[in-house]
Image: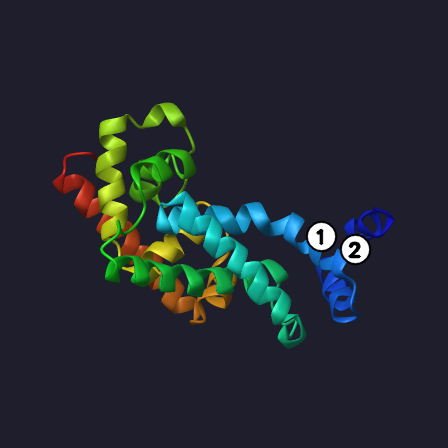
Amino acid sequence: MVLLKEARGHSDAGLVEQCRNGDSSAFDEIVRRYKDRVYAVVYRFLGNREDALDVSQEVFVRAYRGINEFRGTAQVYTWLYSIAANLARNRLRDMGRKGRNRGTSLEALQEAAPGIADAAASGSVTPSDEAIGSETAELLQRCLTELPENYRMAFILRTTEDLSYEEIADVMGCPVGTVKSRLNQARQMLRDRLRELEVL
């Protein structure tokens, strides 16, 4: 308990260093700080609680095993998100091969991004549960599911996690220009599809 309280006062970089020196309570603190955010990203991407929980746990297993390889050139949370993005994409492909539901569910969309219609229209998020009825949310869910994986992940990281372009580029392992292009295309695809469905 004393070690955990001490760990809570450290920066992420300090916690990583403690982990490398064999302090397991430091990694417990990293998990405490980021488990909810990692789960949220994976859940929004996959739309399935059970799969999201499995993938989120695997993210921290991978991080723990790879802590000595973490270079420290990125923030800890962007490193965790990059692990999460890779594992989530792999799980999505596995789900597709097994014939399971792909993409974000209606429940996930309503819970995770209630202002997604406005986000699609303007590129900004205005979270308001009242803004979307269940019928509209269902249509929006279909539109989000239709986005290519990389566009969807960039959109989620930007609109729901509020990551900068540079942070998203770190997570996705691509140039900032590619991130901006994917976001613009994702927003345009969502706008076009929503207009087709007479939502916007």
- Crowding at dot 1, Cα within 10 Å, few <14 / some 14-19 / many 20+, comes out as many
Q: Residue 29, which numbered label?
A: 1
Circle 1: residue type: Glu
Residue at 38 percent of width and 56 percent of height? 153
Which residue in the rendered view is the most extreme toward the left? Answer: 196
Examine the rendering and report whether any part of residue 158 can be seen. no
**Looking at the picture, does residue 184 appear above or below residue 120?**
below
Q: How was this image coloured?
A: rainbow
Q: Is there CB contact under 8 Å for labels 1 and 2?
A: yes
Q: Residue at x 23, y 45 (%)?
A: 143
Where does label 2 land, which residue? Answer: 10
Residue ID at (46%, 56%) = 55
Inspect the image, locate mark 2, and give the three-letter code of the amino acid beneath it. His
- The answer to whether residue 116 is visible is yes
Question: For the view shown, which residue lies furthest in the right direction?
Answer: 2
Which percent across, then down, holds residue 147? Answer: 26, 54
Q: Nearer the viewer, residue 54 or 123?
A: 54
Outermost residue toward the top in this view: 130
Which corner quadrant holds the C terminus?
A: top left
> Which of the two discs, 1 and 2, labels the residue nearer the N terminus?
2
> How much space separates mark 1 and mark 2, taking CA atoms?
9 Å
Q: Residues within 10 Å of mark 2 (few under 14, many from 20)?
A: some
Q: Residue 18: x percent and y percent?
A: 78, 65
In this image, 158 relative to 16: left or right? left
Residue 53 x %, y %: 48, 49
Dividing the picture into quadrants, the one containing residue 26 is: bottom right
Residue 163 spot, x, y in % from top left: 51, 53
Q: Secondary structure at mark 2?
A: loop
Image quadrant where residue 115 sits: top left
- Say how many tags the image has: 2
Side (left or right) of 168 relative to 155 = right
